Image: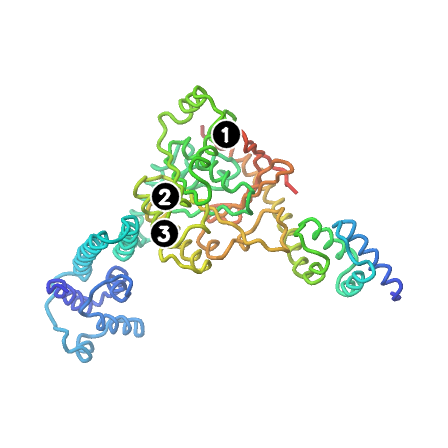
């Protein structure tokens, strides 16, 4: 470790002991120092462990003498600034060192390893670095000026209908969701196989695109051309036919007319065939795609086929961590994340009714992390796609149906209870 | 209830089961389990379970039905309660949406 960094760390330690303000630098520097995975190099790790342990036990910082009694090598020096200043300096030094290490390591690995593998490893390490260097935005609710700024920003974000997020275009959902599909929200669509989950995700994506947003659709199951056929059908709402598109039976003239009417002067709409990736597709790859395309709303179809950052082999662990990571992705990137989740079949349950969150495959954590959960259940016998809210942190519970023809993309709302 | 009456009732339930599921059963043996089931459930409840089992069509047989009747009972209760709840939420949604549409049109 460079001497200069060691000096900064010593100054931080002295400052914390003098100012008794461990809490202010705990999340940004001290906590990462104590976590092995952060790769923080520290000359004073044992001392920080002692100071933190003391603080946890007695709810105050130890005196300097108590520290030197155990660690005689800790020198007392004058510090003129607040601890946060030294914490920032130390963090910057750490980021500089780690970035250099990651790049140098990548350069070395490129000599004898697959470039795609090296790129994936670099992305993973950079996100880990980012995880331990991002400051969390804590909020003081007593600060009314800050609140006023926030509400002004919300009003600025709101569209003509006053919704800060993206409206779904389905009135019974929008009536119960005052925020719309808003930034930082983790939305889960759950349902049995072949019951319209992906179609519904496509409908939300098409609606967002129609309103001028940039959707990014990560498809783990279907190929990109197949998803495009569905999106064209949904966006066209009666103009195109899904089965015709699948067979390529569309005239160039019709395609041009469709393009001019629905896609011209609209933002990009990218589909990522994550399932075709040669390597395990994880939340790190998702972040890389967000960085690449800068979407305003993200769709993941579907969660059980995506890995968490640690690529956990146990499905329950993987889904728990992935839920946490997707929620964080939505907050850090300030976009809504809509993820599809499959259902664990239970022989005693009625597969003809919309599922509940208790039936989500592999992990109940998906339920806890979700801000909004919608069960999607198509009833082929009457053509109704039932949408039932299973969780809504932003408003009331809702239910309704779409009389929906997947073949043509046309739909209208219906309030019957499908049996 | 006499033993003969119990056997008759069990055979009627077995016939009901066959009618609903279309499964081929052992008519000389399988009705005995309905006598045991009759100790804990009423005739109406057993018929309700048979209806539910036939409805979910989970490709299992009568042996699975008897071995898992408590699970089926719980699942049926959950399904029925959820159906009532959905009916209520549908009604509320419809009312809320009508109000929301009125307000939305006004603001425009």
What residue sits right under mark 1 in the picture? A247
Chain letter for mark 2, please. A
User: Which residue is at a point 36% across and 55% down the rendered structure image?
Assistant: A309
Q: Position of residue A173 (x, y in %)?
A: 51, 39
Marks 3 and 2, the one that precedes in the sequence: 3
Give the Cα distance between marks 3 and 2. 10 Å
Task: Say which element carries label 1.
Answer: loop
Across and down, in percent, residue B65 comes to 70, 58
Q: Residues within 10 Å of mark 2 (few under 14, many from 20)?
A: many
Residue B64 x/y as whole percent: 69, 59
Q: Secondary structure at mark 2?
A: loop
Please report, as a chain letter, where disc 3 is located. Answer: A
Reading the chain from its start, which is encountered first: label 2 or label 1? Answer: 1
Q: Is residue A270 above or below residue A287?
A: above
Q: Height in image: A329 above or below B98?
A: below
Q: Secondary structure at mark 3?
A: helix
Residue ID for mark 3: A328
Label of residue A335 in the image = 2
**Which tag, 1 or 3, sits closer to the chain's start?**
1
């Amino acid at each position: 470790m460079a001497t200069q960094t060691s000096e900064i760390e010593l100054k931080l330690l002295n400052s914390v002991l003098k100012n008794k303000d461990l809490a202010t630098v705990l999340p940004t520097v001290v906590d990462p120092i104590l976590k092995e995975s952060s790769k923080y190099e520290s000359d004073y790790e044992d001392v920080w462990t002692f100071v933190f342990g003391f603080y946890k036990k007695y709810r105050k910082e130890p005196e300097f003498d108590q520290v030197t009694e155990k660690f005689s090598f800790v020198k007392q020096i004058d510090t003129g600034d607040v601890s946060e200043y030294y914490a920032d300096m130390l963090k910057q030094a750490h980021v500089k060192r780690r970035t250099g290490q990651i790049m140098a390591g990548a350069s070395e690995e490129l000599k004898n390893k697959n470039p795609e593998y090296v790129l994936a490893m670099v992305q993973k390490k950079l996100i880990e670095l980012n995880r331990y260097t991002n400051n969390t935005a804590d909020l003081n609710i007593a600060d009314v000026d800050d609140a006023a700024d926030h509400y002004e920003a919300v009003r600025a974000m709101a569209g003509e209908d006053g919704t800060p997020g993206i409206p779904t275009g389905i009135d019974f959902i929008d009536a119960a969701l005052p925020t719309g599909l808003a930034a930082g929200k983790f939305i889960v669509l759950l349902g049995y196989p072949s019951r319209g989950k992906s179609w519904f995700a496509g409908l939300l994506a098409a609606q967002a695109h129609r309103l001028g947003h940039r959707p990014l659709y990560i498809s783990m199951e279907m190929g990109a051309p197949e998803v495009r056929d569905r999106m064209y059908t949904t966006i066209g709402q009666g103009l195109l036919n899904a089965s015709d598109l699948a067979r390529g039976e569309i005239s160039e003239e019709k395609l041009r007319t469709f393009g001019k009417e629905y896609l011209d002067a609209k933002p990009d709409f990218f589909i990522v065939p994550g399932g075709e990736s040669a390597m395990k597709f994880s939340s790190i790859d998702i972040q890389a795609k967000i960085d690449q395309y800068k979407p305003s709303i993200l769709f993941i179809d579907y969660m059980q086929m995506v890995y968490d950052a640690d690529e956990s082999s146990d499905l329950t662990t993987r889904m728990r961590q992935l839920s946490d990571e997707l929620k964080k992705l939505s907050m850090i990137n300030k976009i809504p994340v809509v993820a599809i989740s499959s259902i664990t079949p239970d022989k005693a349950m009625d597969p003809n009714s919309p599922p509940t969150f208790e039936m989500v495959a592999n992990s109940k954590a998906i339920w806890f992390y979700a801000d909004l959960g919608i069960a999607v259940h198509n009833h082929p016998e009457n053509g109704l796609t039932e949408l039932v809210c299973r969780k809504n942190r932003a408003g009331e519970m809702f239910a309704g149906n779409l009389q929906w023809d997947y073949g043509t993309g046309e739909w209208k709302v219906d309030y019957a209870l499908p049996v | 209830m006499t033993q003969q009456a119990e056997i008759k009732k069990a055979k009627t339930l077995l016939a009901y089961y066959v009618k609903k599921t279309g499964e081929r059963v052992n008519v000389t043996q399988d009705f005995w389990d309905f006598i045991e089931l009759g100790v804990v459930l009423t005739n109406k409840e057993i018929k309700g379970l048979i209806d539910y089992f036939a409805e979910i069509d989970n490709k299992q047989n009568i042996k699975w039905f008897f071995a898992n009747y408590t699970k089926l009972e719980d699942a049926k209760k959950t399904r029925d309660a959820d159906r009532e709840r959905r009916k209520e939420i549908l009604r509320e949604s419809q009312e809320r949406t009508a109000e929301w549409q009125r307000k939305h049109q006004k603001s425009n």
